[in-house]
Image (tube, rainbow, N blue to C red):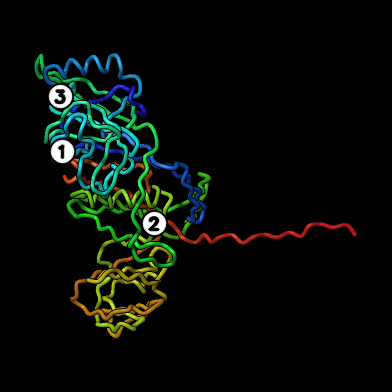
Amino acid sequence: MADADLPVFSFRANWREPMAERLGFLTDVLAATEGAEQRRSVRQTPRRSFEADFLLTGSERTFWDLFINALGGGEVVAPLYWETVTLPATLTATVSNRVNFDTTRREWAYHEGYLALLIRDSALDYEVVEIASVDDGGVTFAAPPARSWTKGSKLLPLRRAVLDQVGDVQQPSAGVGLVTAELRVVGPNPWTPAADASPVYGGLPVFLSEPNWVEALTAQQSREVALLDTDVGLTYQVDATGRVLLGQAHRWFLPGKEKLAAFRDLIYRHRGRAGAFWLPTFKADFRLAEAVSSGATQIVVANVGYGYTGGPTSGREYIAIKHSGGTILRKVLSVVPGSTTATERLNLDGSLGLALAPGQDLRISFADTARFDTDEFEIMHYGGIEAHHDASALFRTFKNTRTSPTPIDFPTPRTA
């Protein structure tokens, strides 16, 4: 078995506090003065670490002390605790070599050919088995376990890792210890994202993963300003991009494995800061004032001063119309006064494709080209795969004016 000779980090997690899983991509971002960007992902898979709390009682407290002292400086095999499976039936020694459970949208498929941990009620009571194959209905071991494991025992996938940080051991009593440790996975961390069902506009997907509003949605408006000051005269200021670059923070609740897998799809699909998409503000920036037909290329909205501030400009020239059937993205070509001072008319680059009326369940937001503003993502696990998880991310808009270069052809000089 690969890595079977490595020490087994068999300590059981204390779920009193959530477990933090961190994924780190790496992107090389080359930004032009006017705001356009060129981005290149430089890691095949992200780096991964996770931080967990451990409650150590009885012999486990002494075992922790011995393990960290003798083995904590090298590589170990450690479990991914949120992928824990409870055995649905007894595994009989030298006979049973399969555990049936739903592996879809989980990480078990990426552990084929590697190791798993069988454990009961103590870090000293475990067995390591090799995973021969994984299918949608369960995992098959290369050989049955050497001992029987009763129904209710735990099965966890193992990964090669190192102990990056070990916190101070708190000792409420002589026989009890509390400690936090961070383990860093050694090796690739693959995940194949599911097909993106988002609508596509202008070659980019439209980001539709709504944030939860438990916390206020924050937006940072910044400008790329160059200031020339000689200290003896007037200052001179240049707005290099001619627009605001918006930073936006979102947080999501991810109950169950499907929501968790969808978030992994999202960050792996865009590979951190490398990917680009259309990002709505998710705010009610406009309110529809008059009903429109499906073939309309103009909508009437309540006056918000769009025309007064110059109409469609970079960063504020696209709108996302959310309705009961999905989201429509359109470019605003121009804005003209409405029939009254309370309205404005927006001329769009295409028909809506469906009829809309005021009062319907819809929201009209500005949209702009954006990317993640970080390569580092943190997922908080509050239990196993079907428990609650949450995550957050930062976004940054950018000026999408870069065009693909055309080949430059210089004729080869020839002598007469």
Residues tagged 2 and 1 counted as in contact (Cβ below 8 A): no
Q: Secondary structure at mark 1?
A: strand
The residue labelled by disc 2 is 370
* N-term mark: 2 or 3: 3
The residue labelled by disc 3 is 122
The residue labelled by disc 1 is 86
Q: Where residue 28 sits: x, y (%)? A: 48, 44
Q: Report the amino acid beneath label 1.
A: Thr
In the image, taking residue 395 as reference, residue 239 lies left or right, namely right
Farthest residue to the front: give it.
95
Q: Report the amino acid beneath label 3.
A: Ser
Q: Spatial distance from mark 2 to mark 1, Cα to Cα?
A: 42 Å
Q: For this rendering, which residue is in front, 84 or 359?
A: 84
The label number, if any, that marks residue 196 in the structure image: none
Frontmost of labels 2 and 1 is 1
- What crowding class fits label 1: few (fewer than 14 Cα within 10 Å), some (14-19), or many (20 or more)? some
Res 210 quadrant in image:
bottom left
Q: Report the amino acid beneath label 2.
A: Ala
Res 47 quadrant in image:
top left
